[in-house]
Image (spheres, rainbow, N blue to C red):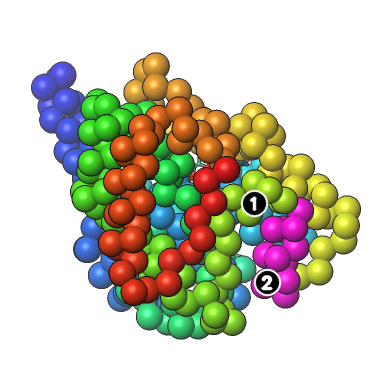
Amino acid sequence: NDGTLEALRAKLREALAELLLGDPRTMADIRRRFTPRPSDVHIVTYPKAGTSWVQEVAWLVNHDGDIECAGRVPSSQRTVYIELSTPAVDKLAVLAASAGPRHIKWHHSAPLLPPRVVEEGRVIYLYRNPRDTAVSWYHFQRMNTLYGFTGTFAQFLDLFLRGDVAYGDYMQSVLSWWALRGRANVLVLSYEELSRNLPAAVRRIASFLGKAPTDGQVAAIAAHCSFERMAANPMTNASSMPKVAGEGEFMRRGQVGDWRRYFTPEQVRRMDEWIAQRAGSEAAPPFEYE
Ligand code: A3P
């Protein structure tokens, strides 16, 4: 009956929301059952930094520009979001049975990942300037039914600066990975760098993964991964994601500098202060806002 169905729906929503937040039980399960392999590729980001973008680029680079497969199999199946456990699929079992190379997505900061991934895994970390990240996160949390955020941007920014959002404090994530940027097994890139020159970013990722794509492959990968093409492609546009009506698409604008339409000068000042305070004496990346 309707009551039972609604109760089940509520339970499911609760369970999913908990898991999306990086439920410690899921992380404990990962630590117990996930065995890293040298051929794994780990895509690590704070949400909304451009995860889906860099994961598509990296997958294509590592699969010799296999556009045919990328046009047939959803990106979320080719790169497994390991921290999001799903009731119907045991992703850790799927990963264990996979011939590889396995592409795995994480949103946590370095101290929360299994140490072997951080120390030995091939990690691509993508960051984005925090103003655009906050704007994108605000829209995503309004649009995605798991969050269903109904507040204003100003209210969301307060939560973001307090770290009271899924995956916590943005600067904690960035600083934890920025500190590892000198390691041979960690490649740190920015959204703005991809946005400025995608073919150059394709080559950096290729060199990191020990691949030597032809000029034609680089051009094909960059074309496939343009905002317009990814937005129109059902394998990459997350069109099946449960959405709140009227709140727009996952592939929203894909721009550097959209923050200008949201931030007041006072909010810019507060965020700059927050960055300086969070960084303290640690090195922080040079965020690009234009
Ligand atoms: P906006 O909301 O600013 O448009 P994530 O994959 O980490 O959730 O990040 C989503 C953000 O990356 C969204 O930002 C989305 O539009 C942007 N994005 C995804 N694919 C992109 C692409 N090919 N080019 C530029 N931006 C892209």
The amino acid type, in three-letter code, at marker 2 is Leu
Q: Main secondary structure of the magenta part?
A: helix
Give the quarter of the image for residue 71: top right
Of the pair 157 and 62, the residue shown nearer to us: 157
Give the quarter of the image for residue 107: bottom left
Q: Are marks 1 and 2 in contact (CB under 8 Å)?
A: no
From the top left corner, tell me how far across and down residue 151 is, in percent: 24, 27
Q: Is mark 2 within 8 Å of ligand 1?
A: no
Residue drawn at the location 37% of the way across and 73% of the way down: 282
From the top left corner, tell me how far across and down residue 169 is, in percent: 29, 56
Where are the magenta residues, as a range?
A: 199-210
Residue drawn at the location 67% of the way across and 71% of the way down: 209
* Position of 191 relative to 12 (above/below): below
Q: Image quadrant for the C terminus?
A: top right
Of the pair 202 and 232, the residue shown nearer to us: 202
C-alpha distance separating marks 1 and 2: 17 Å
Write down the residue under mark 2. Answer: 209
The amino acid type, in three-letter code, at marker 1 is Leu
Q: Which mark is residue 194?
A: 1
Whether residue 184 is in magenta: the answer is no
Q: Image quadrant for the N terminus?
A: top left
Q: Is mark 1 within 8 Å of ligand 1?
A: yes
